[in-house]
Image (cartoon, rainbow, N blue to C red):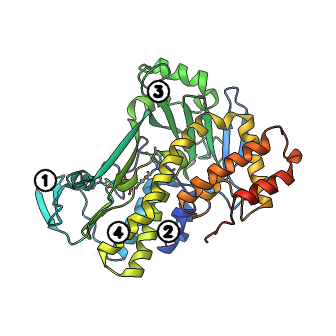
């Protein structure tokens, strides 16, 4: 990435939030990243008629998510790793791993030369199609589930205007929610927006049904007309960029005794709708470092404790990410949903230790994901009861709210 410019089609930017920022701070890297992020204060929903509705993500201006360039982030991480003495071997593909001896096979992608490395300990961060995980299938009682969505994604671009500025509100994540399909756009620091189109693979209005330039342009002009006007290269981008698939991976164990451990997407790939895959991977690093501080390089102990602390939380964010897909493509356009969001913020203002919206627990705090999932379900029931016959926050029955909240929720431990 330090040599080759990234182009659309490979996820140009990511939403970085509290868990990722905490890990970067611990590594002393966050301050240096401020010039490669754009804070996004909320969702900007675009209706077919071009009406805009802004919905803040959090309770104040500090609760934002940050659009960060994937390439710039990787470059900063690689530079920092090298400054601290790491050696990066590029173009070496892991093609095998001996579960018994810990030897790792590598193929030089440029010369096809095969080598074996007698690694003492392997931390496998080789993503959702992990080669080490594939080898772990040979372990007796290795559990693996992979669940693909029927939807794919494609990256597109909204260019900057003639002065290099953003053509849509800069500090927002833009969403065009349309039921069974959706377009989103995140700002880049160069004035462009990286857009992602989510569509079913098959059926009407699907990647399979959009096969000509005219079909693509007509589809966009009828579903996302305000975005289509800003995308002069839409049809070219559409056909030159790949269509990606989205998968949820759950597996166990994550480690082979004290010899190897999966981390990040290799252990727990999730769909991108909560903007948490990278954040969760960075949080893995926070936990791993804490355990190494606690136990030293007693890898069997460290890996075992790591998995028992993280697995339940990785499973929880995987489930919440799938749930959030329906919310983003469907419910954000619904007035009752927007009202419930307002009620959530009002409840949080009154009960900051007791009622923290699920989105905030996941995005703005380091509350374990499994706690966010469980409390989110309880809070959902409370919200349904409180909102049942009410259309305005002023009309909420605060006595009922007080009773329901104090009965069902204990104070939260809010970590820094
Ligand atoms: C469309 C999309 C949007 C997303 N948006 C967000 C977001 O907004 N916020 C967020 O937090 N997350 C987001 N994610 C998720 C995020 O990209 C991943 O969770 C994150 O990149 C995982 O990091 P990782 O290091 O575990 O794996 P990866 O980023 O996949 O890195 C794996 C690395 O291993 C290398 N590798 C793979 N196989 C081998 C092999 N056999 N040998 C050697 N090397 C190998 C790869 O080249 C790569 O460098 C998104 C994902 C997608 C697809």
Query: For the residue labelled by badge 3, is the local secondary structure a helix, a strand or a loop?
Result: helix
Asked whether 197 or 383 is in front, the reply is 383
Task: Report if the CB atoms under discs 1 and 3 are less than 8 Å apart.
Answer: no
Asked whether 408 or 316 is in front, the reply is 408
Would residue 169 be seen by someone viewing this image from the given angle? Answer: no
> Which residue position holds label 4?
304
Query: For the residue labelled by badge 2, is the local secondary structure a helix, a strand or a loop?
Result: helix
> Which residue position holds label 1?
111
What percent of the width, then of the height, locates residue 292?
38, 77
Q: CA distance from mark 3 to mark 4?
A: 50 Å
For the C terminus, the image quarter is bottom right
Decide if ligand 1 comes within 8 Å of the CB at mark 4.
no
**Label 2 vs 4, first from the N-terminus:** 2
Task: Report if the CB atoms under discs 1 and 2 are less than 8 Å apart.
Answer: no
Asked whether 327 or 373 is in front, the reply is 373
* Mark 2 or mark 3, whichever is nearer to me: 2
The image quarter in which residue 192 lies: top right
* Mark 1 or mark 2, whichever is nearer to me: 2
**Label 4 vs 1, first from the N-terminus:** 1
> Which residue position holds label 3?
235
What percent of the width, then of the height, locates residue 407?
74, 58
Q: CA distance from mark 2 to mark 4?
A: 24 Å
**Label 3 vs 4, first from the N-terminus:** 3
Q: CA distance from mark 2 to mark 3?
A: 38 Å
Instruction: Please state the total of marks drawn on the protein image.
Output: 4
- Mark number for residue 166? none
Residue 23 higher or lower than 111, as above or below: below
Q: CA distance from mark 1 to mark 3?
A: 37 Å
Q: Residue at x 60, y 25 (%)?
A: 223
Q: Residue at x 77, y 61 (%)?
A: 351
> Which residue position holds label 2?
24
């Amino acid at each position: 990435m330090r040599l080759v410019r990234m182009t659309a089609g490979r996820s140009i930017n990511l939403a970085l939030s509290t868990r990722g920022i905490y890990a970067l701070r611990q590594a002393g890297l966050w301050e240096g990243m401020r010039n490669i992020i754009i804070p996004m204060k909320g969702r900007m929903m675009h209706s077919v008629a071009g009406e805009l509705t802004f919905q803040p993500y959090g309770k104040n201006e500090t609760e934002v998510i940050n659009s960060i360039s994937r390439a710039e982030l990787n470059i900063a991480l690689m530079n920092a790793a090298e400054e601290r003495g790491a050696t990066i071997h590029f173009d070496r593909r892991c093609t095998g791993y001996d579960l018994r001896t810990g030897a790792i096979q590598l193929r030089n992608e440029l010369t096809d030369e095969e080598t074996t490395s007698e690694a003492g300990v392997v931390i496998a961060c080789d993503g959702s199609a992990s080669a080490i995980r594939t080898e772990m299938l040979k372990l007796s009682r290795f559990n693996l589930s992979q669940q693909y969505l029927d939807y794919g994604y494609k990256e597109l671009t909204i260019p900057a205007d003639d002065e290099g500025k953003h053509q849509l509100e800069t500090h927002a994540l833009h969403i065009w929610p349309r039921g069974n399909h959706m377009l989103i756009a995140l700002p880049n620091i160069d004035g462009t927006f990286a857009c992602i189109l989510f569509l079913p693979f098959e059926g009407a209005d699907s990647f399979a049904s959009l096969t000509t330039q005219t079909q693509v342009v007509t589809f966009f002009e009828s579903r996302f007309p305000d975005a289509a006007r800003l995308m002069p290269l839409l049809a070219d981008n559409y056909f030159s960029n790949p269509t990606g698939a989205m998968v949820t991976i759950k597996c166990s164990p994550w480690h082979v005794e004290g010899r190897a451990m999966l981390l990040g997407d290799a252990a727990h790939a999730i769909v991108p709708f909560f903007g948490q895959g990278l954040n969760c991977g960075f949080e893995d690093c926070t936990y791993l470092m804490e355990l190494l501080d606690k136990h030293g390089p007693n890898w069997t102990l460290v890996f075992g404790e790591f998995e028992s602390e993280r697995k339940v939380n990785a499973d929880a964010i995987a489930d919440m990410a799938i749930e959030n897909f329906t919310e983003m493509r469907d419910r954000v356009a619904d007035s009752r949903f927007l009202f419930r969001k307002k009620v959530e913020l009002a409840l949080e203002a009154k009960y900051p230790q007791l009622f923290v919206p699920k989105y905030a627990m996941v995005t703005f705090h380091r509350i374990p994901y499994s706690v966010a999932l469980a409390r989110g379900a309880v809070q959902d029931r409370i919200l349904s009861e409180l909102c049942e016959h009410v259309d305005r926050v002023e009309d909420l029955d605060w006595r009922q709210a007080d009773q329901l909240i104090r009965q069902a929720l204990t104070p939260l431990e809010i970590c820094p």
